Image: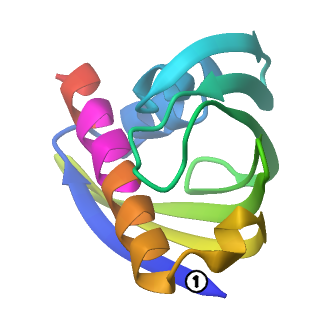
Amino acid sequence: MIELEGHKTFAVPAATLWAKLSDMRFLVDCIPDVGQIKAVGDQSAELVLRPSLGFVKGELQLSINVSEQVPPSSSTLLLKTKGIGTTSEVLATFTLQDASPATDLHWRAAVMQLGGLLKAVPKGLIQAAAQKTINDLLNNLDKKLK
């Protein structure tokens, strides 16, 4: 299993950050490499990604489902991708801590399953790609909050 985690501080109150992170429409707008948004609900989303990763070609179907929420401090999301000859499952969690006037976000992502061609990709490449995607998402989130 591949695990990643990190922290980022946002210059907004915890209540503001929670409201944005628990809004699936806002969250989807922060995801990098989105080609098409198919459906967005309160607790789920379906979209098409066109990743700019050398070892993943074409499109990936991404489904996001909120599996647990503890307002206003933490949430767990299950992300599943499916592409030509590839599948993955990632469990992502985040926790907010008030650091008035800012908010500290602690995140963790665990790759639970890699299928098809992704099984042959070296762990280091998967980790680097996942870290880049998470950093891009957090940077997009930060920009949209300003």
Q: Is residue 116 left or right of residue 26?
A: right
Please give the name of the residue rendered at 80% of the width and 31% of the height, measured from the top-left corner.
43
Whether residue 55 is in magenta: the answer is no
Q: Is residue 99 left or right of residue 123?
A: left
- The residue singled out by tag 1 in the image is 2
Q: Quadrant of residue 37?
A: top right
> Residue 72 placed where, x, y %?
58, 48
Please give the name of the residue rendered at 29% of the width and 53% of the height, measured from the top-left corner.
135
Q: Which residue is nearer to you in this view: 108 or 116?
A: 116
**Residues drawn in magenta:** 134-141
Q: Quadrant of the N terminus?
A: bottom right
Whether residue 135 is in magenta: the answer is yes
Q: Quadrant of the C terminus?
A: top left
Q: Is residue 27 above or below residue 80?
A: above
Please give the name of the residue rendered at 31% of the width and 56% of the height, measured from the top-left corner.
132
Q: Quadrant of residue 124?
A: bottom left
